[in-house]
Image (cartoon, grey):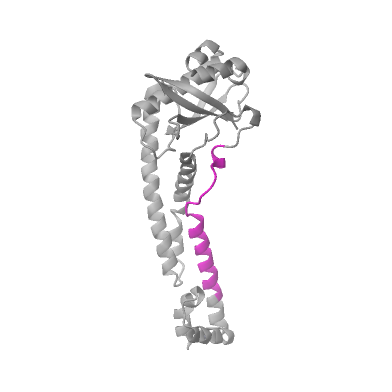
Amino acid sequence: MNCHDVRETLEGYIAGDLADREASEVARHLDACPACAAAYEETRLLVAELKDLSGAFRPVPLDAAAFVSPAASPERRPRRRSWRPAWVLAAAVLLVVLAGAVAVATVPSVARTVPLPVGAQLNDLQQQNELMLEQTRAMEERVRTLEERIKSLTGDDVNVVPTSEQEIPDEVTMAVQQVVIQFIKAQYAGDLQRLKELSTPALDARIDERPEDYLRDNAGTVSFAQMTDVGIDENGLYLTFVRLSDTKVFSDSQYQENFAVEKSGDRYLVEYMETDA
Ligand SMILES: [Zn+2]
């Protein structure tokens, strides 16, 4: 095997694709030829790097901690146990894909300028990149639509994050988000009566037990930072999470309120509200 032959087979050698006899010929040549040994080392590192890259941009399974952290105080947890449904996980994965797609967009063009035979890896990356860009575009479109929808709904400036892949009718989403926003406004207005009107009998009773968990009237003025799309859990409750700040208690950070909303006759009522980090 001469230098040319060896350079041609380096990628296969690194991938372990060569027949034993051919592989040992390459190994012998690399032992004896510093130039090819250097080319081998360079190719090996590049392939490893590209594999790392393509691994890094694959949507990975993760827990929902990035978006919904565990409740701060366990004793305040509700009787309802399965409150974080699968769509929250799906949401977290989608958000990672969205972030990854932006990051990966510049990789293939950079990598393509590297004059080494790593075509297969580049192809892989390119394909993943295109797939993710497609998903990003679809999600961006969805975010825009949802943002317009929520803005015309409440008159407040609320950013909506798409989370649920489930088909919830628009009017249901609106009704749920509207009751949630009214609920939060009543919290900040210290309007206990209004809070109870917006609640199911079960929540009404919990508000009576611990009104201080629900009232925010010492916290100044609320601003809505972000609101998830509406999902539905296995009990038929509508779920949405809102990230908030205000002018006194959370003036330089945000917190989250998690809502479960129940349809009751032709009204939507808050069945459960949990404060989250
Ligand atoms: Zn050589």
Q: Is most of the magenta stretch helix, strand or loop?
A: helix
Q: Residue 164 in the image: x percent, y percent?
A: 42, 38
Residue drawn at point x = 42 percent, y = 62 percent: 124
Q: Is residue 173 left or right of residue 85?
A: left
Quarter holding the C terminus is: top right
Q: Would residue 148 be seen by someone viewing this image from the given angle?
A: yes
How many numbered discs?
A: 0
Q: Nearer the viewer, residue 88 or 25?
A: 88
Judge whether 75 appears above or below 59 on screen. above
Residue drawn at point x = 50 percent, y = 68 percent: 47
Judge whether 269 appears above or below 68 on screen. above
Q: Would residue 73 be seen by someone viewing this image from the given angle?
A: no
Q: Residue 147 in the image: x percent, y percent?
A: 40, 31
Q: Nearer the viewer, residue 201 or 197?
A: 201
Quadrant of the rendered image containing residue 34: bottom right
Q: Residue 95 in the image: x percent, y percent?
A: 47, 43
Judge whether 66 appears above or below 174 on screen. below
Residue drawn at point x = 53 percent, y = 61 percent: 52
Residue drawn at point x = 52 percent, y = 25 percent: 272
Q: Residue 86 in the image: x percent, y percent?
A: 47, 41
Whether residue 44 is in magenta: the answer is: yes
Furthest toward the top, the residue is 193
Whether residue 219 is in magenta: the answer is: no
What is the magenta range?
41-68
